[in-house]
């Protein structure tokens, strides 16, 4: 599809959505309120989805509950086959997903076509198959005269609440493992990015039994909150900010149910003087500007050994300046707009509120002449640990660069944060790399690379970056409960 065809398709698809997908069909919302959807590249309205009510949530959870018993009894191989058919359908609608993801989220079309949708399909394939056989303790006689077996059972009904930065990838990372092991689900996409999830759930509805996968559009405080505290929801799988995660976790705890929380990050990137600087800077800039820095693991908090500071700033500037800021649908664009006017205002306020000692040596000002939500690649020096721009997640294409004196100082500064999602280390010294990987308090540590992710490997947030694990076998196990059965073999 050309850019104009993509815009026509996205707005036609968005206009066709007048309800929630519940029990295998589009169902009119019981609320008369709507959420407008905007194209971040132009600021133009694309369409709308229902701002659903608590009653809509009740209907969807009821449908998921009704479908759960027979879905849980379906053999794992048959569930896998059904999920592969959903992946086939997504592959067959590849260009439609590219269009929706670019227009909804503002992602550059070249990256969405080359990386994002292919990796979404790859994740679907992995999750569809890998849930067929989960590991656990071998059955055996652990006490004399009695035999034990351990069963892994689905938890029941899962609520999936997703963020706007990777709408389809986040939806798939929750839906596929949860369904593969026999749960049913109600998904609520973020307010600003409902479209690709809508198409996914609609296509899945042509393959899966009615009620296995449902979507309810709406706001976090209404639909998200109702899902988190619904007595018939067994587990909430949430990805989003720490502040919202705390609310979701509290609501879930109130009903004594599990919440899997994948929350924010503020990834330290440690660049030692002995690193291969050109390749380190390539990886850092790519990892900082991907998705315009709207990534919980973005490589934007740089800690650089003093001896190479000037060289690093020069290399960063050169590389950032080679990125092309523009309309997400232009194939030349490598940095798209921020996702929403609210996100643009948030990033602009953080950069605009720098303390006097800090300056932007590149970028620093929003570009809104075209109506889109653009913020250019920006490099900030002079800020330190306690300044908001360093201490908090920026979620924009904004690098902060600080210095460290030695290994101990690097380690202390990296760990001095409430976040614990990811860190990266660039060094050619094996001892430094090993000390750092052992001592850093983050769920993912990259050495001489950044932002390389695959569904086989786990993502876990330490500290305030979350609870539980997504992806990998550990991610599957989050959607199961463990039942121990013991038989007295002497009777
Ligand atoms: P957010 O917390 O504002 O919203 C996330 C989702 O929660 C949305 O669907 C929203 O509607 C819903 N929500 C809002 N209030 C709610 C409530 N009271 N109850 C239930 N649900 C509610 O986050 P966001 O701005 O959409 O996403 C950005 C954040 O997500 C960043 O902090 C980022 O780091 C984090 N994130 C984390 C990961 C990870 O794997 N750890 C991945 C992607 C994004």
Image (tube, helix red, strand yellow):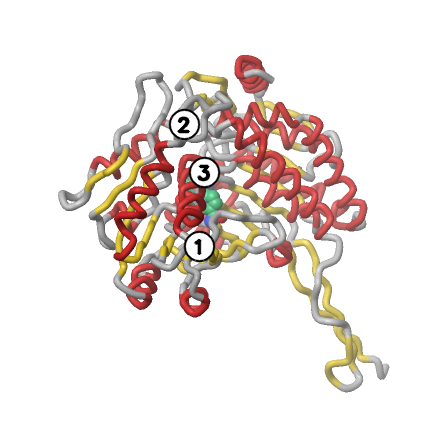
Residue in the image at 73% along x and 33% along y: 88
Q: Is mark 2 within 8 Å of ligand 1?
A: no
Number of numbered discs visible in the structure rendering: 3
* Image coordinates for residue 49, horizontal then vertical, percent: 51, 23
* Residue 122, above or below 253: above
One can see residue 346 in this view: yes
Q: Percent from the top left, x then y, of residue 456? A: 63, 53
What kind of element bears circle 2?
loop
Mark nearest the camera among 1 and 3 is: 3
Residue at disc 1, secondary structure: strand
Could you tell me if residue 15 is visible in this image? no
Asked if residue 436 is positioned above or below residue 24 in the image, the reply reads below
Q: Quadrant of the N terminus?
A: top right
Q: Secondary structure at mark 3?
A: helix
Which residue is denoted by mark 2 in the rendering? 324
Viewer-closest of 481 and 277: 277
- Which residue in the protein does label 1 denote? 422
Quadrant position of residue 410: bottom left
Which numbered marker is on residue 310? none
The relative height of residue 51 versus residue 128 in the rendered view (above or below) is above
Q: Ligand 1 closer than 8 Å to the CB at disc 1?
A: no
Q: Earlier in the sequence, mark 1 or mark 3?
A: 3
- Give the CA distance from mark 1 to mark 3: 16 Å
Q: Earlier in the sequence, mark 1 or mark 2?
A: 2
Contact between marks 1 and 3 (CB within 8 A): the answer is no
Q: Residue furthest left?
A: 356
In space, the residues marked 2 and 3 are separated at their CA atoms by 12 Å
Q: Mark 3 sits on what residue? A: 290
> Is 350 situated above or below 457?
above
Instruction: Answer few, some or many: residues within 10 Å of disc 2's Cα (few below 14, many 20 plus, some between 14 and 19).
Output: some
Horizontal arrangement in the rendering, residue 22 relative to residue 50 (left or right): right
Of 56 and 356, nearer the camera is 356
């Amino acid at each position: 599809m050309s850019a104009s065809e993509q815009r026509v398709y996205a707005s036609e698809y968005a206009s066709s959505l007048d309800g929630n997908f519940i029990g295998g069909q589009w169902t009119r919302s019981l609320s008369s309120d709507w959420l407008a959807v905007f194209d971040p590249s132009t600021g133009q309205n694309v369409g709308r989805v229902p701002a659903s009510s608590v009653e809509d949530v009740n209907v969807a959870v009821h449908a998921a509950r009704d479908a759960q018993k027979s879905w849980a009894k379906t053999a794992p191989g048959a569930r896998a086959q059904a999920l592969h058919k959903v992946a086939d359908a997504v592959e067959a609608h590849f260009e439609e997903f590219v269009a929706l993801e670019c227009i909804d989220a503002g992602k550059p079309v070249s990256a969405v076509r080359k990386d994002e949708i292919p990796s979404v399909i790859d994740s679907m394939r992995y999750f569809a198959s890998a849930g067929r056989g989960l590991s656990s303790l071998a059955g055996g006689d652990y006490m004399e005269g009695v035999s034990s077996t351990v069963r892994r059972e689905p938890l029941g009904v899962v609520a999936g609440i997703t963020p706007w930065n990777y709408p389809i990838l986040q939806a798939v990372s929750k839906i596929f493992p949860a369904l593969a092991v026999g749960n049913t689900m109600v998904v609520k996409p973020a307010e600003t990015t409902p479209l690709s999830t809508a198409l996914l759930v609609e296509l899945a509805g042509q393959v899966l039994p009615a009620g296995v996968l449902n979507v309810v559009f709406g706001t976090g405080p209404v639909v998200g909150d109702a899902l988190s505290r619904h007595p018939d929801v067994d587990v909430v799988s949430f990805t989003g900010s720490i502040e919202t995660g705390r609310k979701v976790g509290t609501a879930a705890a109130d009903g004594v149910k599990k919440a899997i929380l994948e929350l924010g990050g503020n990834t330290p990137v440690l660049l030692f003087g002995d690193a291969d600087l050109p390749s380190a800077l390539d990886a850092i800039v790519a990892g900082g500007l991907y998705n315009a820095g709207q990534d919980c693991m973005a490589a934007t908090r740089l800690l650089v050994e003093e001896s190479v500071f000037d060289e690093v700033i020069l290399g960063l500037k050169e590389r950032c300046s080679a990125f092309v800021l523009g309309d997400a649908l232009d194939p030349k664009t490598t940095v798209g707009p921020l996702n929403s006017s609210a996100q643009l205002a948030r990033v602009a306020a953080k950069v605009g509120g720098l303390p006097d000692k800090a300056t932007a040596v590149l970028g620093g000002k929003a570009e809104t002449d075209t109506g889109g939500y653009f913020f250019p690649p920006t490099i900030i020096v002079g800020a330190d640990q306690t300044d908001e721009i360093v201490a908090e997640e920026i979620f924009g294409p904004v690098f902060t660069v600080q210095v460290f004196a030695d290994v101990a100082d690097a380690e202390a500064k990296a760990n001095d944060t409430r976040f614990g999602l990811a860190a990266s280390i660039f060094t050619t010294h094996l001892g430094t790399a090993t000390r750092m990987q052992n001592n850093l308090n983050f769920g993912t540590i990259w050495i001489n690379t950044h932002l390389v992710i695959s569904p086989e490997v786990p993502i876990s947030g330490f500290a305030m970056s979350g609870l539980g694990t997504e992806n990998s076998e550990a991610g599957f196990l989050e959607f199961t409960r463990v039942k121990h059965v013991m038989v007295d073999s002497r009777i």
